[in-house]
Amino acid sequence: MEKVFEFLKDCGVYYLATVEGDQPRVRPFGTVNIFEDKLYIQMGKVKSVSKQIEKNPKVEICAFKDGKWLRLSGELVRDERVEAKKDMLDHYPQLRAMYDENDSNTEVLYFSHGTAVFSSFTEPPVVIEL
């Protein structure tokens, strides 16, 4: 999991895919954190992406850097604890202009399980189970 976290952190931006009905939806994200040995992301509950994950928690993340890419697929679980939200926002203080661990909009989600595949054109794939 640490390798997945470091790659996403180094990329700065990754792309999160969800589904809305039968339509895939992809958008850029940048938050990633490890809290209590789980890989977390953060978003606002008012956003469409949050509503899509609520209906179908299966997601996929894709990130690319230096000729290598990561595809991480799995299921996200909401963590409503203030401690988890605070830890995420402490790692991303610039988000405090929009989010607060005590507001009704901030949410953090962790991968309950997942499969990460690191690929490139020059090396065999490396698979990591979360």
Image: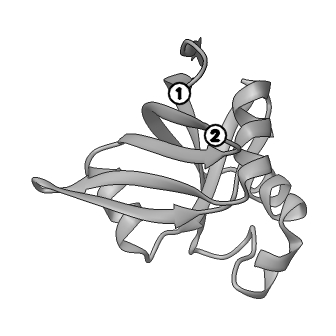
What residue is shown at x 89% (from left), y 62% (from top)?
90
In which quadrant will I find the C terminus? top right
User: Contact, CB < 8 Å: mark 1 with mark 2?
Assistant: yes
Q: Secondary structure at mark 2?
A: loop
Q: Is residue 42 left or right of residue 33?
A: left
Q: Amino acid at mark 2?
A: Gly
Q: Nearer the viewer, residue 112 or 70?
A: 70
Residue 3 visible, this angle:
yes
What residue is shown at x 81% (from left), y 64% (from top)?
89
Question: At which x and y percent is residue 92?
Answer: 83, 66
Q: Is residue 92 left or right of residue 110?
A: right
The answer to which quarter of the image holds residue 102 is bottom right
| Count of all numbered marks drawn on residues in the image | 2
Label 2, on which residue? 67
Residue placed furthest toward the bottom: 97
Question: At which x and y percent is residue 21?
Answer: 12, 56
Q: Amino acid at mark 1?
A: Phe
What residue is shown at x 63% (from left), y 51% (from top)?
41
Label 2, residues with CA under 10 Å away: few <14, some 14-19, many ≥20:
few
Label 1, residues with CA under 10 Å away: few <14, some 14-19, many ≥20:
few
In which quadrant will I find the N terminus? top right
Q: Is residue 84 left or right of residue 63?
A: right
